[in-house]
Image: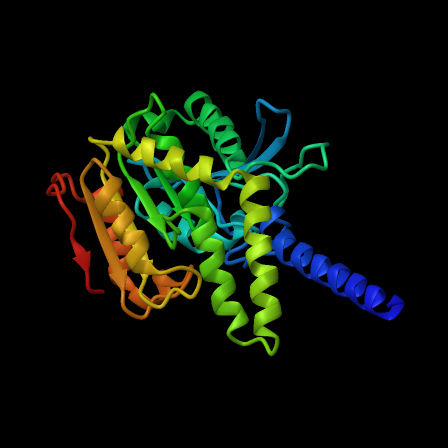
Amino acid sequence: MMCLAIAALALVVGLGVLVWRTASRFIWAGAGSGLRDPEPADFASAAAFSVVTDDAVRIAGLTIHPDRPACGVVVLCHAWGLRKERFYHHARWLTEHGLVVVAFDFRHCGESGRPARLWPEPLDHGLRDLEAVLVHVHAHVPEVSRGLSLMGFSYGGNVIIAHAGFSTTRYRALILDSTPLMPYQSYISSYLRMARARSSMRVVRQIADWLAVGLVTALLRGNRFFERAIASCARLGHTPLLYVVGDKDPYFPPDEACDFVDRYYAGPREIFRVPRGRHLTNHLAAGAEYQQRVLARLVDDPRPIERGTERGTG
């Protein structure tokens, strides 16, 4: 009897450890090293700045000016667990086309700080970081009067879409790349389902994953973040959206994310599905067409986008 009790306790403890290890990957963003291409020193006019959010977290950023008169400003929001350096190659060609680029690190990432409390923060904490940066942009980047756009990658895109509809700013355009537009529990479940396909203990992993999804969704209030995104989309009837998604994205089903855009986004939108695109590599898979579509929304194309959806073929 004692042996059975010990075995049961060991099973419960082991399962608890597995659940926590799985859940912790989604609870804290960490500080990914990112890809440094190019280094900040490669930008002749890069200026570092820092701001403080309304809950007293220091956010580090960089403003990069083009070498000619600017035609507008675009703020880049990086993916979960990465840092602003990961998207410096985007900043390079954006500035080459006359845009002022503002990049920053979300809290817990890169050079930004983190709250003093240990309790996990809600998933929508990134809204506070972005909004603090935008206050700085409006106050210290005069080129914002020529147009302000937002471009987000994965989680950064989720923050943008949840923010824009509640902002008093009318954005020139919103660009989302590799953004999982779906309920948070669906995103985590999809991610873990693909991960455990390679596991030798699928039944145990399935139980642990189910418990981890419930824990993470409750702690991070993922449903609240998703509902805010839906409400925000309904307010964006005059803001063009470009949604870029790879057909081979391994982290979420592209069809479900595209259906979100079709169903909820009130304004003009374009969906660019990249046939060979994967998570955060659509710019590599689509090549020049990726840049052309992004720049058409930010710089080159003054014509309004037709109401409805264009599903690009890449």
List x then y, in percent, for residue 25. Answer: 61, 55
In the rendered view, tell whether residue 79 sits above or below residue 125. Answer: below
List x then y, in percent, for residue 246. Answer: 33, 62
Q: Nearer the viewer, residue 37 or 262?
A: 262
Q: Nearer the viewer, residue 139 or 97?
A: 139
Furthest-right residue in this view: 2
The number of discs equals 0
In the rendered view, tell whether residue 253 sits above or below residue 55. Answer: below
Furthest-bottom residue in this view: 200
Q: In percent of the image, x 28 and y 29: which residue is there? A: 146
Q: Quadrant of residue 235?
A: top left
Q: Quadrant of residue 48?
A: top right
Q: Nearer the viewer, residue 139 or 214?
A: 214
List x then y, in percent, for residue 247. Answer: 31, 65
Lateral position of residue 160 relative to residue 51, left or right: left
Q: In percent of the image, x 72 and y 32: which residue is there? A: 116
Q: In percent of the image, x 58 and y 75: which residue is there? A: 199
Q: Which quadrant of the rendered structure holds the N terminus?
A: bottom right
Q: Nearer the viewer, residue 200 or 312?
A: 200
List x then y, in percent, for residue 113. Answer: 66, 37
Q: Which quadrant of the rendered structure holds the C terminus?
A: bottom left
Q: How is the image coloured?
A: rainbow
Is residue 30 among the parts visible in the rendering? Answer: yes
Is residue 64 among the parts visible in the rendering? Answer: no
